[in-house]
Image: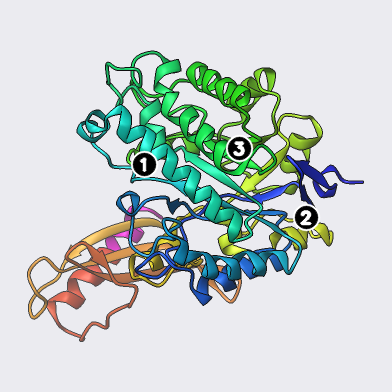
Amino acid sequence: MDALFEKSEINGMVLSNRFIRSATWEGMATDEGGCTPQLIDLISDLSTGGVGLIITGHTYVRQDGQHSPLQLGIHHDALIPGLQNLTRSAHEHGSKIVLQLGFGGAYLSKSRIRGMSAQNLQELAEAYGQAAVRAGKAEFDGVQIFAAHGFFLSQMLCPRYNDRTDDYGGKIADRGRALIEVLDAIRNAVGRDYPVLVKLNCRDFVENGLTLEDSVLVASMLEKAGIDAIELSGGLLNNPNIMRSKIDSEDSKGYFLSEARVFREKIHVPLILVGGIRSYEVARELVEEGVVDYISMSRPFIREPGLIKRWKAGDRREAACISCDNCFEPIKKGEGISCLPLEPEEAETFFPQLSEIVPASPPHPPGTSYKISIGLEDWALNYIPVIKIQMVSNGQISERSPSFPLGTQDHQKVTQAIADLLEKHK
């Protein structure tokens, strides 16, 4: 049987396949952080589409940890009934669902990292524990600690932001202390049998950021403390250009594949890889070779919530997502995340070989010109030589060909330019 569609377990949580929807900010909650019918429909579509495990967008564990408007919350008990409707929509179609727990945004300053006392950090860890209890009451199959992409726990791991001189700063064992205390608080609250995952940067890809070597050490600390699975990602949200260059330079086997291989040698809990995987064959290769245990995707499921169902049915074409990030545009308008494909560019029909610019005379405005070109143009799938004349105004070229009143200076200049071009380039 195909390894991607074998059943597996993460601390007793039985998954129908090896595909995971990585946490994605949906922008579909109420102003108070509550669940909405729109979000329930999205989760239902993912489950119907065959996703084995769905991880929600990051939820704030405390009111002062909200990152953005319309973000889902898990900070008080009144949210539990709405979240139960969410989990039941996933379970109805056979998916498992995990709630991602987070705090703070990706744009925190060093002063905020410095300003939290040891007691503040311990109180925050307790808030994570209480949030995990609420997740269990809302029938989530587990929780995931969000410690990636420059959000609070990620920044605590990053020397670029964490320059504390107490027990929470300095060497990686101390920079990782807050994360371990969060895991401990969750375990104390929900016990050892409740699945607890973590999303971790394999490295930050910035100067003075979390290194691969330190990230592996953090993963070892988490494994020893009882984490059930690690999802590997990378980069900081507030340094998008750095990550864009990383993404553009990688092949289709995943942005963090080389880092995952290093983790595989050191870490024994299940590994989940996210970032740039769009091909069924690549996903199967990574799992069958044992590089990772699960394949996680985000944007492909925004475009195609039924992608896994399609692949299982035998249609193994790559995901339709082109990673244009246009799916986040509707969120900015308060409409929630959705695929908004870029308008396809019109196919070229004219291929100029020679061109010349001729200044236009009044009544055309100053700076207007004619662009006269000789080349091949597609006419009903036949390419024939043509003379194409276009207006140029303010640097913009119009595709419309203007007419020239007989006997005017423009007519004479254009006619002469055409004659000169033909003579010069017989």
Horizontal side, residue 391 vs residue 258: left or right: left
Quickly name the residue at label 3: 254
User: Which residue occupies the extreme top position in the image?
Assistant: 171
Disc 1 residue crowd, few under 14, some 14–19, many 20+, Cα 10 Å: few
Q: Say what amino acid the circle numbered 2 marks.
A: Arg
The quarter of the displayed image where residue 420 is located: bottom left
Image disc number at residue 240: 1
Tell me how far mark 2 sits from mark 3, CA to CA: 18 Å
Element type at mark 3: loop
Tell me residue 244's x, y (percent): 42, 40
Q: Is residue 236 visible?
A: no
- Report the amino acid beneath label 3: Gly
Q: Quadrant of residue 254?
A: top right
Q: Position of residue 95 (x, y in %)?
A: 72, 59
Does residue 425 belong to the magenta stretch? yes
- State the image quarter where residue 195 is shown: top right
